[in-house]
Image (cartoon, rainbow, N blue to C red):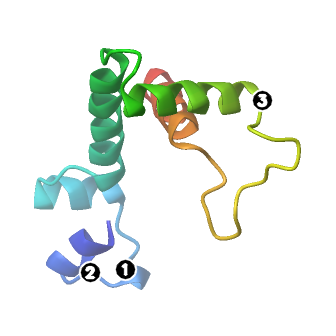
Amino acid sequence: MKAQHNILHISWYDFIIRDSIRQQTKLVDLPLVIADHRRVILGHIVYLRGEAPAYTMLQHAINITKGSHPAASWKHQPGWPLKTWLQQVIADQDSDTA
């Protein structure tokens, strides 16, 4: 959205609604594009064979989403996203149905 503001030379204090900016630029909102790409990648991974590394990683992500971690002392590293990739895909699906 910030790039669209820059295209139209709109400052943050102009108080213009996002929908009107999107209509003027005729560009799709970037989070929607990213969510769509996540779904496409997930669709490709789901149909891989079981021994493919990407499929194995998807199974690990599903286990982590369900609450089972690889080790008892497992924590995500500082600075890494709090949500896993699969949790983001699920959140995208929930926001689309709402």
Where's residue 36, x and y in %? 29, 36
Disc on res. 10? 2
Where's residue 72, x and y in %? 88, 42
Disc on res. 3? none
Return the residue found at the far right: 72
> 15 left or right of 66?
left
> 15 left or right of 71?
left
Q: Are marks 1 and 2 in contact (CB under 8 Å)?
A: yes
Return the residue at label 3: 67
**In this rendering, which labeled residue sits more in front, label 3 or label 2?**
3
Mark 2 is on which residue type?
Answer: Ile
Query: In whole angstroms, how far apart are the C-alphas of marks 3 and 2?
Result: 44 Å
Return the residue at label 1: 14
| 86 w.r.t. 15: above or below | above
Where's residue 21, x and y in %? 24, 61
Quadrant position of the N terminus in the picture? bottom left
